[in-house]
Amino acid sequence: MLKVEDLVVHYGRVPAVHGITLHVGEGELVGLIGPNGAGKSTTLAAITGLVKPSSGTISFAGEDLVAQPPERIVRQGLALVPEGRHIFGSLTVEENLILGALARTDRSGSEEELASVLERFPILKHYFKAPAGKLSGGEQQQLAIGRALLSKPRLLLLDEPSLGLAPLVVDQVFEVLDDLRSQGITILLVEQNAARTVELADRTYVLRTGSIATSGTREELHEAGGLMDAYLGI
Ligand SMILES: Nc1ncnc2c1ncn2[C@@H]1O[C@H](COP(=O)(O)OP(=O)(O)OP(=O)(O)O)[C@@H](O)[C@H]1O
Ligand SMILES: [Mg+2]
């Protein structure tokens, strides 16, 4: 469904990603893990059109994404839950959600989508008219995921959704992702929480300083035994 081949991205003259190849099949939950500065966010930025690759190809459902601006990529059915959530604290929960609905091509279904998001995340219904800044970190992450779901994505991309959350809240976030997968939503999950991601994902790619160090299913990565070595580069 998503195919990234030999992706190279520079910031100015500095290479951030050098030659990443990965794919995500329909209905899969694929992990992309790696330490600080490995190039995880840059990879997501290239896929969603926020940075322009120096070389390589990115295609989604057979369509070339590289030449397309971010708003067209969203309309193809990709939705990004960005690092740090990007919630507008002074706007209400409702207003934050409406921003997600604006990305839809076909708005007719958005009432229905909204109802299903509020059913999935009751806390958002409870605080619907309250400023989003009043929500806890975990609740804001639910809002960020809910907002992305409003565009009815075919592929949901998440950038470190567990960052800064208490362990119990991290559990909830991972449960939500497991749930979304069982409903057939395809997911590319970027995380620093390597162990949890490998456990959850169908397959995981381990990124280290701009390239893929290793990849595989949880069984393959455990068997190889070198996951932490690959991850940490030791
Ligand atoms: N806007 C930018 N301008 C210049 N260099 C950047 C920029 N954004 C990222 N970089 C550099 O590119 C490399 C990859 O960064 P990236 O943010 O993709 O890593 P990451 O894996 O998402 O890290 P983290 O886990 O900290 O979010 C790093 O060396 C980083 O310093
Ligand atoms: Mg990042």
Image (tube, rainbow, N blue to C red):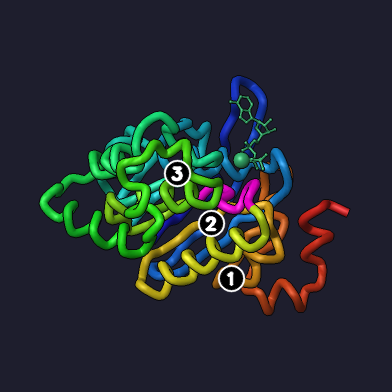
Of residue 104 and residue 220, the one placed in the foreground of this image is 104
- Secondary structure predominantly adopted by residues drawn in magenta: loop
Amino acid carrying label 1: it is Leu
Q: Is disc 3 placed on a helix, strand or loop?
A: helix
- Residue 115's spot in the image, x, y percent? 23, 59
In the rendered structure, does residue 159 fall within the stretch colored magenta?
A: yes
Question: What's the distance in space between the residues labelled 1 and 3, CA to CA?
Answer: 22 Å
Question: Along the horizontal axis of the image, is 182 left or right of 94?
Answer: right
N-terminal label among 3 and 2: 3
Residue count near mark 3 (Cα–Cα under 10 Å), binned few <14, some 14–19, many ≥20: many
Quadrant observed for ligand 1 in the rendered image: top right
Label 1 belongs to which residue?
200
The answer to whether mark 1 is within 8 Å of ligand 1 is no
Of residue 167 and residue 81, the one placed in the foreground of this image is 167
Of residue 71 and residue 60, the one placed in the foreground of this image is 71
- Residue 213's spot in the image, x, y percent? 72, 56
The answer to whether mark 3 is within 8 Å of ligand 1 is no
Q: Is disc 1 placed on a helix, strand or loop?
A: helix
Placement of the C terminus among the 4 image quadrants: bottom right
Magenta-highlighted residues: 158-165
**Marks 2 and 1: CB-CB under 8 Å?**
yes
Placement of the N terminus among the 4 image quadrants: bottom left
N-terminal label among 2 and 1: 2
Label 3 belongs to which residue?
47
Amino acid carrying label 2: it is Leu
- Residue 221's spot in the image, x, y percent? 71, 72
Label 2 belongs to which residue?
189
Question: Along the horizontal axis of the image, is 115 left or right of 60?
Answer: left
N-terminal label among 1 and 3: 3
